[in-house]
Amino acid sequence: MTKRALLFPGQGAQKLGMAKDIYDELESGRAFLDQLNAALNFDVLELMFNDEAQLGLTQYTQPAIVSHSTAVLNELTIDYDYTVGHSLGEYAALVASGVLTAEDAVKIVAKRGELMATAFPKGTGSMAAVLGLTVEEVTAICEQLSTPELKVEPANLNCPGQIVVSGHQEKIDAFVRDGKSLGAKRVLPLNVSGPFHSSMMECIAEEFGAFLETFTFNDAVVPVVQNTTARPVTDKDEIKQQLIKQLYSPVRFEESIRYLIEQGVTEFVEVGPNKVLSGLIKKIDRNVTLTALGTVEEIKGWNAQ
């Protein structure tokens, strides 16, 4: 029997006009998105549809992506055995697994985005994508470049040959400058507002943890493979603890996908804007079936099967 996992993208998948067709063409989609918008203290739909500059800011990007992913999910007729998200995408995965309501998920990620965006003054911490090296090689270079005061660390373990590092700006700059001489094909600085998924982000863990305590979490009905462990979790308290830890821990995406394939998953369905995760999975294992669902046309095509 075919096993299926739902995938939910993270930051970087946003695009101007995201979910506009769902809002315009589906009555249920409009009602759902209006409900999520009303849960926030800013107009996320205005940013998604009309304001590319603001949409690119972390505190707005995060609720925008979760709004789009959960709006698609709300329209789908689909069975699945696991859920998994990339960083921010884990919150939409928790909605799909019955752990959080969509309204609570967007409220949580709005706060998460705000904390992440303001944790460090601009220019003090950042991230870069390293192409062409293994995790072990990247880890070794990070250790070589880091000092007790200034660090760079593996942050997103995406797929073979694509690892994102995160840390103090000075060390990111050094990695970008010296990466090729250290063996990387390329090192590309990322346009982000902070050193996400590095130990530097521990400074926001306590405040974020206290904020999570104001929401109701349920045990997962469908196991969610969390970024920090790359293993399925159903216990609500463990899920909550891993969400806090995720802020300052690597996203173990490749390991999560390999685990799911070992469990017999042969079909991955990406739910939300763009097709970023499908591209990563092609580099992990070309033998699985991939589908991306983010538009009304794609939703209708899937439901008509």
Image: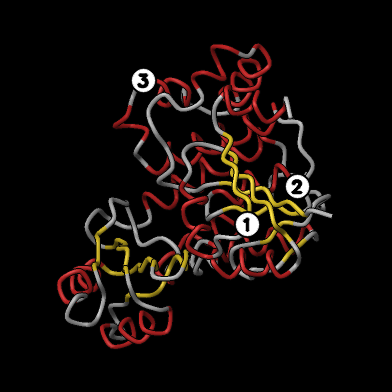
Query: Which image quarter holds the N terminus?
Result: bottom right
Indicate which disc, 2 or 1, sits on the residue closer to the N terminus. Answer: 2
Residue linked to disc 2: 97
Secondary element at tag 3: helix
Q: Residue at x 56, y 48 (%)?
A: 89
Residue linked to disc 1: 288
Nearer the observer, 29 or 292? 292
Find residue 231 and report its image quarter.
bottom right
C-alpha separation, residue under disc 3 versus residue under disc 1: 36 Å
Q: Amino acid at mark 1?
A: Val
Q: Amino acid at mark 2?
A: Ser
Q: Nearer the viewer, mark 3 or mark 1?
A: 1
Indicate which disc, 3 or 1, sits on the residue closer to the N terminus. Answer: 3
Secondary element at tag 1: loop
Q: Position of residue 273 (x, y in %)?
A: 49, 36
Q: Position of residue 24 (x, y in %)?
A: 54, 12
Residue linked to disc 3: 50
The answer to whether mark 3 and mark 2 are in CB contact below 8 A is: no
Q: Residue at x 54, y 44 (%)?
A: 109
Q: Residue at x 61, y 15 (%)?
A: 30
Q: Nearer the viewer, mark 2 or mark 1?
A: 1
Q: Position of residue 200 (x, y in %)?
A: 40, 69
C-alpha separation, residue under disc 3 versus residue under disc 2: 31 Å
Nearer the observer, 71 or 39? 71
Query: Which image quarter holds the C terminus?
Result: top right
